Amino acid sequence: MTRLWSALDLLEATGGSIDAAFGADGVSIDTRTLRPGDLFVALVGEGRDGHAFVADAMAKGAAGAMVHRTVPGVRHLLQVDDTLAGLARMGGFSRVRSAAKVVAVTGSVGKTTTKEMLRTILSGFGRTHAAEASYNNHWGLPLTLARMPLDAAYCVAEIGMNHAGEIAPLARLAHPHVAVITTVEKAHIGYLGSIEAIADEKASIMTGLVTGGVAVLPLDSPQFPRLRAAAGTAHVMTFGTAPAATGRLVGFEADADGSVVLAEIGGREVRFRLNAPGQHMAMNAVAALTAAHAFGLDRGAAASTLEAFAPLGGRGARRRLTLPRGTALLLDESYNGNGASMRAALEVLALQPATRRIAVLGDMLELGEAGPAEHAALAAAVARSADLLFACGPLMRHLYDAVPPALRGAHAADSAALAPIVAEAVAAGDAILVKGSLGSRMKRVVDTLDTIAIEGPA
C-alpha cells in the first residue's frame, strides 16, 4: 500500500533532513490520539513543547517525528528549521499534489456545522476528507491538508480567525475551488473593532480561490454588498431567503427534533428532513447545498444525504440524561457563543416540550467594549425561551440582572462554580441548554450533568 508520506515526499515538502529513512501513513500532533505509523509533529505552543513527547510517540508506534531541536536517543527524526513552518509546508505540498476539489468555509457562526454538512453531502459523491472538530487555525488547517488521502475526491477545510490578517494566508494555503462565508456577526469585534472590519476579514478567504473558483455568500447579510465587492471577478453564488438567492430557503416545518426543509437550489426545488432543529441549521444546510451545486453535483441527491446529518458535541448535539425519576434533555452548545448563535440556540430551547426550559449560559468573549450591552441585550430572548436562567462569568452578570427576577436561578463566577449548582437544580422533564464561548469552559457543566446522569439509577 502506498504510504501517505514517503521519505522523499517528507524531504521535498519540508526541506528538512532525515537521520534514517521512513515513511508515514498519517500525521499527528498529539500522542493521546496518535496511531501507529503516524508522523508525530513536535509543535511548540503555550505551555507545552511537543519535543518532550517524542519518545512517548515513538513508543506508541509513530513512524518518525518532525522536530526542530535535538532529541537524544531517538531515531527516525525529520529535522526542520521550525515544526510549525514544516507542518505548513507539508499542508501546502499535499494541497498541490492532490486532485481533490477543495471547499473552504469561514464565517462568524455556523462554519463547523456547515463543514460537517458538506462532509455528509460530498461523501455521497466520492471519498471526502474534512477537518476534525474545529481545526481551523494556523496549525489546524495545515494539519487537515497534510492528512488528506492521496485518492480524496473532495476536501472540506475550515478557516477561522481571532485577529485581522489571519484568514488570507490560510486561504492561500487551502487554495479552494469554492469558498463559503456563512455569516458576518459581531464575534471577535473586540479585536477587529467594527462589523465592517469583520466582513473584510471574512472576505479575505476569497483571495485564495483558484482561477475560476466560486464564492458562496450570504445574501441576507447587511454586509453582503461589502462581501460582493471583495469578490471582484470571482464567480458568486448566494444563499438566503431572498428570491434572488442561488440557494434559497423557501420554508421549513420545525419541531423539537429537527425540521422538514424546503429549498430551491439553482432553480430546483428540494425537500428533506434535517435532524437538527432551528432556522439557523436549515440555513447552514442551504449554504452547504449551494456549495455542492457549485461543484455541479446533483441537487436532489445532495439534499437526500443530509437526512444522515447529526450535530456535533458542543454544537447542538442532543441527548437524554437518565435521572433518578425520569429523563431530561441536554442541548449541548458548549463549544462557542456569540449574540447570533445564542439567540438561535434559545429558539431551539423554546421548541422543546418540557416541564421547565433551563438556559445555562457562560460569557461571550472577545466583544471588547460591546460586551456588557451584548449580554444584556439577550434578556428578551431568554425571557421568551427559558423558564430559568443559570449564568456564569462577569459579562453574563449583565444578562442575569436584566432578566425578570422569576427567571433567575443562580449566577456564579465561573463554570466550575456553576456546574454543581445546575446539577443540584435539574430534574426529570427539564430541557437544559448549555452554551458559552470556549473560554468560558461550559463543557464543565455538560460533564457534570453527564456524571450525575451516569450515577443516577435508570
Image (cartoon, grey):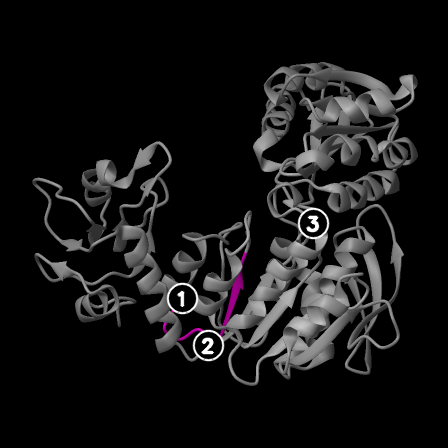
Please report the bounds of the magenta region as a residue range. 148-159
Which label's residue is closer to the chain start, 1 or 2? 2
- The image position of residue 166, as x and y in percent, is 50, 55
Residue at image coords 10%, 49%:
75
**With respect to residue 110, does 214 lie above or below?**
below
Q: According to the image, label 3 marks what residue? A: 194
Magenta-drawn stretch contains 150: yes
CA distance for labels 3 and 1:
36 Å
The answer to whether mark 3 and mark 2 are in CB contact below 8 A is no
Q: Quadrant of the C terminus?
A: top right
Within the magenta stretch, is there residue 251? no
Residue designated by label 2: 100
How far apart, in angstroms, are the residues tagged by discs 1 and 2? 9 Å
Q: Is residue 384 visible?
A: yes
Residue at 49% over, 52% down: 135
Three-letter amino acid code of the residue under disc 2: Ala
